[in-house]
Structure formats: structure tokens, C-alpha cells
Image (cartoon, rainbow, N blue to C red):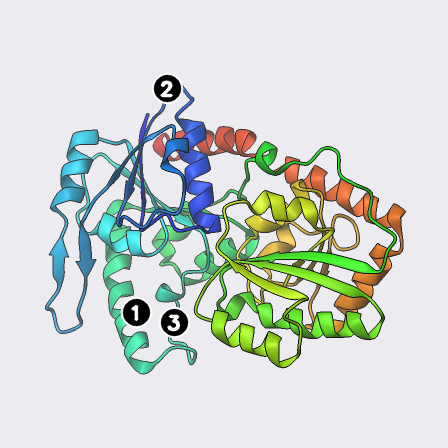
Amino acid sequence: MKILHIIPSLMIGGAERLVIDICNQMSKINDLEIKLLVLSNQIDFDKKKFSFDFSIIKSHLNLSITGSNQVNLSEYENAVREFTPDIIHSHLFEAELLSRWKIFPNITYITHCHDNMSQINDFSRKKSLKKNITDYYEKQILYKKYKDCDNNFIAISKDTRRYFAKILPKKLKKNIFLLSNAIDFEKFYVKERKKISSNRKISIVSIGSLVNKKNQAFLVPIVMYLKTKGYDCKVDVLGDGPNRASLQKQIDSCCLHKEIILHGKVKNVKDFMQKAEFYVHTATYEPFGLVLLEAMAAGLAIISLDGIGNRDIINHNQNAFIFSEQDSKVFGDTLIKLKNNAEKYEKIVSAGQKSASAHDIVPYIKSLKALYHKILNPI
């Protein structure tokens, strides 16, 4: 079986990490041949760790509602003809229209739904009128292409499955399959962790792009509340994005520059996790939450906002804590209670590591391969 994966770039993110793990693991299977096409040279990962064949291509597709489309797909089409895949498996929206613009015969098409693609949603007040019109235009074209190739969809969470079942044309609803995301468990697993200290210092790590939905500004009132309770805090924020300047300004205005440190993009994420006791996840929307599994594997106690998709991972008060309200007192009190209850802390950490191990990439690949066979050979 030959699978061609397509992704817009390899910037550091959950979808990109999963794609690399999939390709690395599948390249070890004798009866599978894997190739990855990357649509730009933006690669934040160490290419020396890629055990699979990949190519960076210059193909692009820019659509215009006026009809003046800019289409350059020669490198993509040549790559498909040369590789002759059984399956084209695309990741993230930018790869969707490009990989479906020309439907090749005798190839099965699969879309990996890493989130609830806002580009194919109905009109939204959160988007400008121009953006709504552009998205609608592209959606109509994409839906036609999906129907033409009888496209298949892999949803990463129950919420994502519900979303696509709601918005896709009736003909395609039967082609939605649920397969929860996975991590390279051994990469993050910490077997021997230090016991939680009994001092009054709380160490936290938080990871994610600095964008609105990740909501890192909520860390500020949490830290301020902990300080009123007499606790010193250290919060390492890993990630970068357009909100960095405004977030730093808010941190400085509250005189928390020593407590909350913005590190930007880092490659040694596990090192920060090993030094922390807690992982605080502030995202208001989370399609799944790979970083939560990684933090669980590393042995951190997790306190998270309910981002809907992360309900598939978190069992409240068992393997982590999940709260529907953005209440700094609730978050702060939970951190304090765990800090002062070593037995409860260890139970949460142990259960979290067990949950993370159940989402390991090795059994995931077996399930994905079985799904490929099911799609290729329907009953």
C-alpha cells in the first residue's frame, strides 16, 4: 500500500507532530510505502529525524471569486504520477483544495480533520464579510471535489466528528471515521519523577501558539490569585504568535515578569515539563489536545479549561481537572489543593500517564492501517 501525505508546512504544532510521527512509524512497516509532500519550506523540525521520504514542492492554488484563479500544480501532479499512491491523505485546510483540484483516477482520498475547519463552516460573525464570501466560494468548490472523489474523513475527537457530520453534504456523512489522536509516548514519558515538593512554590508550564483561542492571558489572574494566597509561582509559557507583545504588556503591567516567562518557540519541551509540577491549559477551544497527552506522559498534573474536544482525554478529578468556567479562584484553589496533597497529586499523575499510554502512536498506527484497508475495501 502506498500512502502520500500532504501538509502545508511543518511548523511546530499538534497536527504537524502527529503527521511526522505517523510517517516515521509507518515507514517501519514492510508492506507500506510512505511519502510526505510539504507545500512550503517552513520546517521547524529536525529533518535528520525523518525516517521517511519527503519532498518540498512549490505548487500553490489561490482562488478568486472574480475567476482570476492562480493555479500552479505541476510539481504536485508530477509527484503524484511519479509516486502512484493508493491513498492521498491530506492534513490541514491549505492542503485540501490543492490536493483535490485534480482528481486522479484509482486513488482514494482522505482528509484528516485536525480541527473544526472554520473555512467550511456557515457564515460567521467572527469573520469579515469578505472572508465569509471567500470561504463560501471555496467551500462550494471543495464540496464538489469531495463528492467527485467520494472523499473520506478522519475525525480526531467526538466533537470534530459531530461537526463534520453536521456540515458535510449527506452523500459524504457515511465516510466519516473517528480515530483519536496519538503521541510518541516514550518520547515524553518520565518514569521516575521527583515527589511534589512541600514548599510554597508552584511551578507550571503552558504550551501553545500565542493566539486568541489559546487564551494564555488567563494565566495572569491565576498567578495573581496564587500570590494573594502566599504562593510563589513560576510559569513557563512555550510558544509564539501574534499575541506575544500584548500578553507581555499585560504581564508587565501586573508586575509578573518574574513569575510568567514567555520563552517563545523551544525545542526542549520535555526539559521544561520535567522541571514543572503542573500543566495549565487555558484554551477556550481545543479540537483534541495532543499537548495534554504529552504533559500526562511527562507526569504533570493537569488543570484545563473545557475546550470541548479535550473531553475525550480528561476524566475530571481522575486523570486531570477540567473546568467549564474561566475562574482564576477555581484554578488557583485546585493547584493549591494538589500542592498540599501529595497522595492525590500522585494518583492524578499516575492515572494521567496511564491515559497517555493508551494513546501511544504504535497501536494508533495499527488502527490507522486497518482503517486504510477498510476504506480501500468496503463491504
Q: Quadrant of the C terminus?
A: top left
Residue 313 position, x and y percent, is 64, 49
Which numbered circle lies on residue 259? none
How busy is the neighbourhood of tag 2: few (under 14 within 10 Å), some, or many (20 plus)?
A: few
Front of the two marks 2 and 3: 2
Query: In the picture, residue 51 is in which quadrant?
Result: top left
How busy is the neighbourhood of tag 1: few (under 14 within 10 Å), some, or many (20 plus)?
A: some
Q: Which residue is mark 2?
A: 31
Give SS at disc 1. Answer: helix
Count of numbered badges drawn on the protein: 3
**Closest to the observer, 198 or 340:** 198
Give SS at disc 3. Answer: loop
In primary-sequence order, the first of circles 2 and 3 is 2
Residue lying at 51% horizontally and 42% vertically, measured from the top left = 179
Q: Quadrant of the N terminus?
A: top left
Residue 297 position, x and y percent, is 66, 40
Q: Which residue is mark 1?
A: 135
Residue lying at 75% horizontally and 34% vertically, measured from the top left = 192
How busy is the neighbourhood of tag 3: few (under 14 within 10 Å), some, or many (20 plus)?
A: few
How far apart are the two marked residues, 3 and 1, measured between alpha carbons?
Answer: 9 Å
Residue 298 position, x and y percent, is 66, 42
Residue kind at label 2, given as amino acid type = Asp
Q: Is residue 326 visible?
A: yes
Q: Is residue 327 visible?
A: no
Q: Which residue is mark 3?
A: 122
**Closest to the observer, 83 or 269:** 269
In primary-sequence order, the first of circles 2 and 1 is 2
Residue kind at label 3, given as amino acid type = Asp
Q: Is residue 359 left or right of residue 103?
A: right
How far apart are the two marked residues, 2 and 3, measured between alpha carbons?
Answer: 41 Å
